[in-house]
Image (tube, helix red, strand yellow):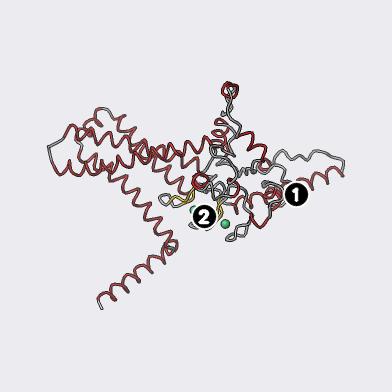
Amino acid sequence: MVVGICRSFRDRALGRCFHFFPCLSDPARRSSLGLKVTLVTLHFIYAGILFLFDGDLVYKTKKEPWYTSLYLLLFFVTLVQYFITSGSSPGYVVDAMRAFNETNEVISGLEQRQSASSKNGSLDATVEGCQSGRIFQGSNSASWTKLVMDMYPPGTSIRTCICSYCNVEQPPRTKHCHDCDKCVLQFDHHCVWLGTCIGQGNHCKFWWYICEESALCLWTAILYITYLKGNISRAWWKDGIMIILLIALLISVIFLLLLLLFHSYLVMTNQTTYELVRRRRIPYLRGVPERVYPFSKGVSSNLYDFCCVGSRIYSLEPLPSAEEIEEKSRPYTCLDVLTCRCC
Ligand SMILES: [Zn+2]
Ligand SMILES: [Zn+2]
């Protein structure tokens, strides 16, 4: 009886809440929002307890405000980066397809105007304004299907490239995410803490976020250790809280630094977490020897693409040919080392 009343009261409260916030009616969105609130709250708890307990830090802030200002700046920059990454698009195939179709429409419109001008005797129509044509090189008057099929080796069946959930042709390195229910270009993983996929469009933002989060956690851990070294045995309960928080923080620091190193390695070799973990199961990687990175263009080119190209445009990468794979699997010679083949 009591349980039934409680349940109906809860259902009514939730119904009223969903009426004002319709986005919360989706359980996946609710859990994602819950994790986001937890993460932001943890940040404020760690910083708040530090300033509440550490009198020396407050005194130091008054004496040398730049030190605390820098720490607080990193704190807010990290949170802003978190929300930017969380709200960014990972590069959905449907969006790339829409951009491709719009580009095609612009180009064909310009072509029609150009031919009309030529007929009238004036040749002033140019396609200079269409910068986005660069995104899909050679795509003029082609269909999305043709563009995608050109990225696979000749003879590949179109059926193997179609996602059965979205019903769109997937370019190479794409995977359907069941949490987002969309196909993601250069799918890396679905991050539950950010509530979004990490893919071509936001991998760079994600890398910067874990870099800033690692620096913030490390700095906070140093402040906690400094407090414990200077204030041990003054108030045991304060020390107890600080020690528990510090242990959790040190575990987070180790995890974040390893994650940062791992993603730096992926960036330098132009791989994704999904490709590395499921290498033997992914059809286009099955025949590629171990330690050969089929999409790598050299460390410096990979870094340039990652920082300057990846998040701005939908750059689609064709599958490397058998000759390219053979060339990449060739053992290193002294000349290769001198000419920096890996760079
Ligand atoms: Zn899909
Ligand atoms: Zn996802």
Q: Nearer the viewer, residue 87 or 287?
A: 287
- Judged left or right of residue 203, residue 43 is left
Q: Image quadrant of residue 50?
A: top left
Instruction: Give how far across and how far down residue 94 sits, in percent.
Output: 60, 54
Instruction: Give how far across and how far down residue 105 sits, in percent.
Output: 71, 50
Task: Provide the residue designation for mark 1.
Answer: 141
- Look at the picture and state if 47 lies above or below 192: above
Dividing the image into four quarters, tell me where ligand 1 lies. Answer: bottom right
Which quarter of the rendered picture does the C terminus lie within?
Answer: top right
Q: CA distance from mark 2 to mark 1?
A: 30 Å
Q: Image quadrant of residue 182?
A: bottom right
Amino acid type assigned to the residue bearing label 1 in the image: Ser
* Some atom of ligand 2 lies within 8 Å of the CB belonging to the residue at label 2: yes
Instruction: Give how far across and how far down residue 191 sits, in percent.
Output: 44, 50
- Look at the picture and state if 204 lies above or below 33: above
Whether the residues at callouts 2 and 1 have beta carbons within 8 Å, the answer is no
- Judged left or right of residue 201, residue 28 is left
Amino acid type assigned to the residue bearing label 2 in the image: Cys
Instruction: Give how far across and how far down residue 226 sits, in percent.
Output: 23, 32
